[in-house]
Image: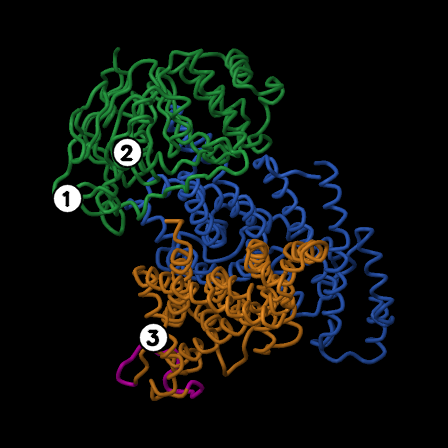
Amino acid sequence: MTAVLDIDDLNIRFSTPEGTVNAVNGLSLSVSAGESVGIVGESGSGKSQVFLSTMGLLAKNGRAKGSTRFHGEELLGLKADRLNAIRGVRMAMIFQDPMTSLNPYLRISRQMTEVLMEHKGLSRAEARSRSIRMLERVGIPEAAKRVDMYPHEFSGGMRQRVMIAMALLCEPDLIIADEPTTALDVTIQAQILDLLSELRGDTNSAVVLITHDLGVVAGLCDRVVVMYAGRVVETGLVRDIFYSPRHPYTVGLLESIPRLEGDGEGGAEHPRLKAIDGQPPNLQSEIAGCAFAPRCPRVEERCQQERPDLIGLDNGHACACHKVGPT
Amino acid sequence: MAAVGERMDRMAGMEEVAGRSLWQAAWGRLLANRAAVVSLFVLGIIAVMALLAPWLSPHPYDEVYWERIQAPPDFANFHWFGTDGNGRDLFVRTLYGARVSLMVGILATGVSLLIGVSYGAIAGYVGGRTDSIMMRIVDIMYSLPFMFFVILLMVLFGRNIFLIFIALGAVEWLTMARIVRGQTLSIKHKEYIEAAHAAGVSNRVIVFRHIVPNVLGPVIVYVTLTVPQVILTESFISFLGLGVQEPLTSWGVLISEGAKQMESAPWMLIFPATFLAITLFCFNFIGDGLRDALDPKDR
Amino acid sequence: MFSYTFRRLLVAIPTMFVIVTVAFFMIRMAPGGPFDLERALPPEIEKNVLRAYNLDQPLWKQYVDYVGGVVQGDFGPSYKYRDFTVAELIGSGFPASFQLGFTAIVIALVFGVGFGSFAALRQNSGLDHAVMAVSMTGIAIPNFVMAPLLTLVFGVYLSLLPVAGWGDGALINKILPITALALPQLAYIARLTRGSMVETLNANFVRTARAKGLRERIVIVRHTLKGAMLPVVSYLGPATAQILTGSVVIETIFDIPGIGRYFVQGALNRDYTLVLGVMITLATLIIVLNLIVDLVYGLLDPKVRYD
């Protein structure tokens, strides 16, 4: 399989009034054509920043170093007009908050057709009918009528459907979905996830799903990358991560997912949810050892001084922990 | 019930503690803003000079020196800014003008604060029909040519300094009322207010003990921006010859006299104009600094 | 939208009524009258004069007559400019005031928005700091200081432009008054524009527009400017009022025969009808312009509903 996206030794730094923040450190990962990869981590783990830098959307005070290649073409430092020939066309992004990510002052029709007119050179009428078809495909009723409405006339779930339709317009090779369901009600979340997995069946696009929710990943992804403090701590196929997690952080994440165990009849004992104690580290200073050490239940002397490398196990499963060796 | 009310009061106390550290953070951010700090300093100097005016110069503000009419700045006779068309020392008169301008600025803003905060807090807190009627009135008053009423008032009832700041205060309260009402509306539904309600604390107590303190941030910012506005308006009225009365003076009066003599005695225009401009500068910088300090998300 | 406009105009009627009433009685309660300043007239003649202007009637009767006249578009005769009606005086002063005010607001808007946008797009650059420093100066130096300073420099020292006068509306006579009138508003609009542009540029929807691979020009013009203009548009109402007020002092300084100057002179001379007439004209102007501004705002912001 060829790599659609290939990130190698990516570092992202933000200069803030309080000092430099090392948001992403030496991160490498690749996404193959048609593949679906889940990126999991707490807020502040740098997972969104990785892909914002891919899209050339880092905040002004952010700098990305390393390499990010899209079909072999280096994206970092690419000129704006060349980058604009890629983003929105061959790779698209769906953002977390559909309430603020659509322009409140423009009709949906305008916000959709402009993509097709800019990139595909379609006439307004052609762009419009294609936009309507796309809205229908993501499940917006009466699309032909609603296409001329403004974003505030849509509900949150409907707006996220519009965002998804907008991302799909040019049939991109790569779709990056940044917490696409976090801002939505639970029932709506399920609908959007269903839509995403349904669309994944229809299209050939590779999907990167950024989320803090392992449960979301389970239904939708082939592979998982777990990030902590700007680094990959564990990566592997979904079933390997879920059934034989190796990194203590991944184990902790899985244990903190609530689930209904037992038959529930007559009040079976629910196991107490386990939380991971402590806070993610402050990324303003270099961390000498393993960033997870202060919160790790299995911490030992070595973890404080020496940073563990990502070590391959089997089946593409890899883990960065001193306590985990190759099997 | 009394016990619960007491506990509510203690909770309000806790709120204040959290609030105080927030104020401290804001204060720190303000001190980091160089323009605002310099402005505070300069404004302090002008205020102190205005207060100490009689002791800073050997000349009384209303003494006429017949032999030195419209004399240029002159250090031998301690006329640092020169003299005016009646041979009075301009340095002392500029500082006396500062007294009047600053006093009118502060008092009129005080009047606008009093009216605006009470009006806005009541409208926002009571809500419903009362609110919409009260804000409707503000909307309508916004579209009135208020300055013309003020000018009219000054022309018709003579130059009375108390009339000036009451009139200006009565003009400037509208925006204050809007800000306070908006803040009150957004705070009203916060949990601790509902808790106070549930505990049977009276409306009056809720408005003045819980809502008013929380509205303070935006109000402070707006106050620092209203003071220069009022000073400006007072100068404007004085410039038209409708402000304070001789031998008292204000910056507007001095600028107006200076403008008439600017060809032969430009210092009569330049010194008071500079003082006015610097003061307006300082208040604006402090206002901007405060806004950034109290609402850091804008940066 | 039509019914909204209609309702707003309906509210304007009682508003105007209040303005007229307050102004009418305010002037009348003030000491002095229109004929006090002249040589004392023989009682017989004074009586005749008062009767000629209906000033011998009870106050309430005069009020009713006056309002009745205004409703029919009759502002009465001027007490000071004996051969003119107030309507004639306002008609003669209006063109000059309108040219000054309108040009000033257009200049303030165009340059204010232009400079403010450039500063926002080059945030924290030298250009940004320069524009903001200059605009702070514009705000801190009021028009009645700016006017004499400009006159001093361009009129007296450089002798490039006339110091005062209208010269029947020659362009060269208008430059200084328009500049003095426009500068403070221009400065304020520039700051307002910069602030709201910076905020909009950081909005999520602008990030979306970039993610869609749109050209920077489209991102700015189509996606940023429209939202960023809203605070500027709502400032236009107060700005008009400020310009109208400013024109009073500017017309006085530059000796321009506009209605602002009539207002000050009228008030000083107790020329009751002239003051009221100018007041009504300006209030009408402000109310109508505010309505237009609100309608334009509604066109820009789809969330505004006229129900």
Lower position in the chain sequence, tag 2 or tag 1: 2
Is residue C37 depicted above or below C219 in this figure?
Answer: below
**Magenta portion: prevailing SS class:** loop
| Res A288 label | 1
Label 3 residue SS: helix
Drawn colour of chain B? Answer: orange
Query: Are dots 2 and 1 on a single chain?
Result: yes
Residue type of the residue flagged with mark 3: Ile
Q: Residues within 10 Å of mark 3 (few under 14, many from 20)?
A: few
Q: Which residue is drawn at 60% across and 56% down?
A: C257
Q: Residue at x 54, y 72 (%)?
A: B110
| Res B45 label | 3
Q: Which chain is green?
A: A
Residue A90 falls inside the magenta stretch: no
| Residue carrying label 2 | A227
Q: How crowded is mark 2: few (under 14 residues within 10 Å), some or many (20 or more)?
A: many
